[in-house]
Image (tube, coloured by chain):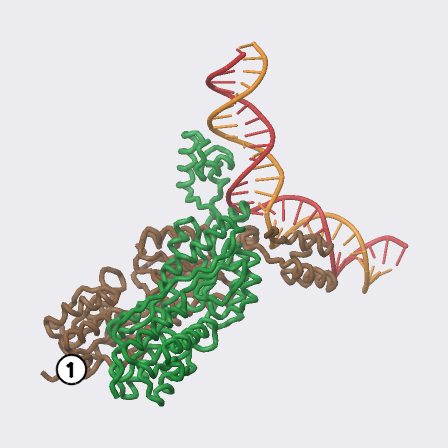
Chain colours: A brown, B green, C red, D orange
Amino acid sequence: MSSNRPTIRDVATKSGVSKSLVALALSGSPKVSPTSRERIEKAALELGYRPNAAARSLSVRRSRTIGVLILDLHNPVFAEILDGFQSELREHGFTTMLVTAGDNPVLELNEIDKLLQFQVEGLILISHRLPASVLHDVSVEVPTVVVTRDDIVSARIDTVSNDDLAGMTLAIDHLVSLGHTDIVHLSGGDNPVSHLRAKGYSDAMTANGLKKHIRIVPGGLTEAKGYRAAAEALTHRPTALCVANDIAAIGAIAAIESAGLRVPEDVSVIGYDGITLGALRRINLTTVGQPLTELGRRAAERILDRVHNPTTESQRVHLSAELVVRGTTGPAPTS
Amino acid sequence: MSSNRPTIRDVATKSGVSKSLVALALSGSPKVSPTSRERIEKAALELGYRPNAAARSLSVRRSRTIGVLILDLHNPVFAEILDGFQSELREHGFTTMLVTAGDNPVLELNEIDKLLQFQVEGLILISHRLPASVLHDVSVEVPTVVVTRDDIVSARIDTVSNDDLAGMTLAIDHLVSLGHTDIVHLSGGDNPVSHLRAKGYSDAMTANGLKKHIRIVPGGLTEAKGYRAAAEALTHRPTALCVANDIAAIGAIAAIESAGLRVPEDVSVIGYDGITLGALRRINLTTVGQPLTELGRRAAERILDRVHNPTTESQRVHLSAELVVRGTTGPAPTS
DNA sequence: CATACTAATTGGACCGTTCCAACGAAAGAA
DNA sequence: TTCTTTCGTTGGAACGGTCCAATTAGTATG
């Protein structure tokens, strides 16, 4: 029953050579005679030999594995970023080990610890919740890149993010060009990314001479929170809502419609992130699109660079976002 | 630079005891004197000692890791199932190792192989693309549970799925009770799950005496494919579309609306899966909801059971789906 | 024909754990 | 006192690979 997995030794005895030669053959070394090679490969196949990654990792002191922590797989943003680095890492012979921590911040630390126990050679962290101190501690042990955050300044941590300030400028400029002035920002709550986007909103409003129209309603990054924040914002009848992310923006639209108003005829809405969901014709959300897969790709690139030459300086990669105009923004209503 | 990670030996010399005692102390054995224990723990902390999972796994011949293969993280269905088992497994001291293969079936095999190399103690597979033969081969090596599929019959493979036939009956009965008779099914393409749902549709139609109204339009499980299939289906002016999954249903709605028809006044639409996305007020999709997190929980339960007593018979867990009535279905138009 | 060299193969140390058999010291029983 | 027990502790053998230095066989060079 469930006979023990065959090891390299079993292959060796079966093919009548030493285990060293098997190792050599299986790693494709050229210094193995064709005869032996053939015999060994045959034996390995017949036994169903599969190398033990733990043993190898122990021996060579490399795991060829990158640990990935993702805040929450429900937000499609993360799935798309994942696409970006998964394939990139795979191409370079690395495996990714993916963990999520649900909504428990303590667990998050725990999961990172587990990844380190597995001797991952690098860490990609996508969570706007991790405190900078933790990131710092981790980065001492292993190359670390933080994605979608720009608030971490450390000589040992790479960051890959889009330029939220510039992105918000795109959003506001777009609304202003449509004649809007009463533009309210529904914030994403208390986290670095949302703070930055709120600042981007304020700066852009000021730059457009709308300083006195600045109004920020505290919200969150979920549909429900977007709904609530929008409901509150509507009491002052703005003509446009600039929302912290797409999911919340979808909630905001619902709030507007259930208040008996139309989007975009009465109120325009613009989101942020550029999730594919927003492209669904039923939603058709105008947004500021981050280059999500590119973000992932660059993260992989940074990690690979750091893994191969650990001494290089950390880099802060900024990608620019782009305006994606769809159907939820329109000319400001002429009151 | 980047001094080598401290090992159990380092902790031993630092605290002046043997490595064996350190191992004992760190595993919380009661047969360690309080004095030594304290010294050891202090040393471990100061050195920042972290056990090497690869070495442990090699030594105890257990990895305490479950491998998970997910078809595609973009479909929110999978994220929700994931939630279900992730926490369950964690509670029982298991780590999950998650991989996806994008849209490349060959890579999928590759990834499974990698998981096995990592000596995972069990495998949770969520992919309706894996051929039964592969599943069988894998299940010989390690306890395997297949989620959201019911077409696998093997003494060694557990399956956890919802009852698609019963679910489809709910959908059709609902539409019939609203007076619909011209109900077209937009299929999900050529895969086991979609076949089953198509059969469920036909059976339920027949059971309602609507055998001659049966019509199936080939589609797919993405929004775009739902859109195209709906566009085709509309040429015959059905009063209701019963779609293979929620994402495709959302596409179908878009097709209906861009044909100048209203949902549900002119055409009703019902999906399948019960993704949270469908609850967004902008979408408000009537659907047949699978108990997604429960599906995940049960998968974990099966795996844990099999890991702990490998001889038990495999089980086929069926959970029932429930009708979720929202805004995309309504009375059949009185022509 | 000895010598040098190359090609193919091998034993053994090592990676960082766990775990078991064995050990010394102290304590209890005879 | 001597013999068991118990407690705390220890060395060393696994686990399954990799890799280096050493060995043998075979071939070319002088």
Q: Residue at x 63, y 53 (%)?
A: A7
- Which residue appears at 41% of the width and 70% of the height? B165
Taking the image as shown, residue B162 lies to the left or right of residue A225, namely: right
Q: Where is residue B288 in the image (x, y as percent from the top left)?
A: 34, 70
Judging from the image, what secondary structure is the residue with disc 1 in?
Answer: loop
Q: Is residue A131 above or below residue A207?
A: above
In x, y percent, where is residue A92?
51, 66
**Residue A97 shows in the view:** yes
Please give the residue where the numbered disc 1 appears in the rendered image.
A332
Residue B19: give x, y in percent of width and height.
Answer: 51, 37
- In the image, residue B223 sits, relative to residue B234, either above or below, namely above
Q: Look at the picture and state if A128 lies above or below B22.
A: below
Instruction: Name the residue nearer the viewer: A32 or A222.
Output: A222
Residue A295: in sight, yes or no?
Answer: no
Q: Where is residue A241 in the image (x, y as percent from the top left)?
A: 19, 74
In the displayed structure image, the side of residue A25 where residue A141 appears, left or right: left
A193 or A282: nearer the viewer: A282
Q: Which residue is drawn at 37% across and 82% down?
A: B184
Q: In which quarter of the image is residue A233?
A: bottom left
Question: Which chain is indicated by disc 1?
Answer: A
**Location of residue A180 by image quarter:** bottom left
Q: What residue type is labelled 1?
A: Ala
Between A183 and A228, the one lying in front of the other is: A228
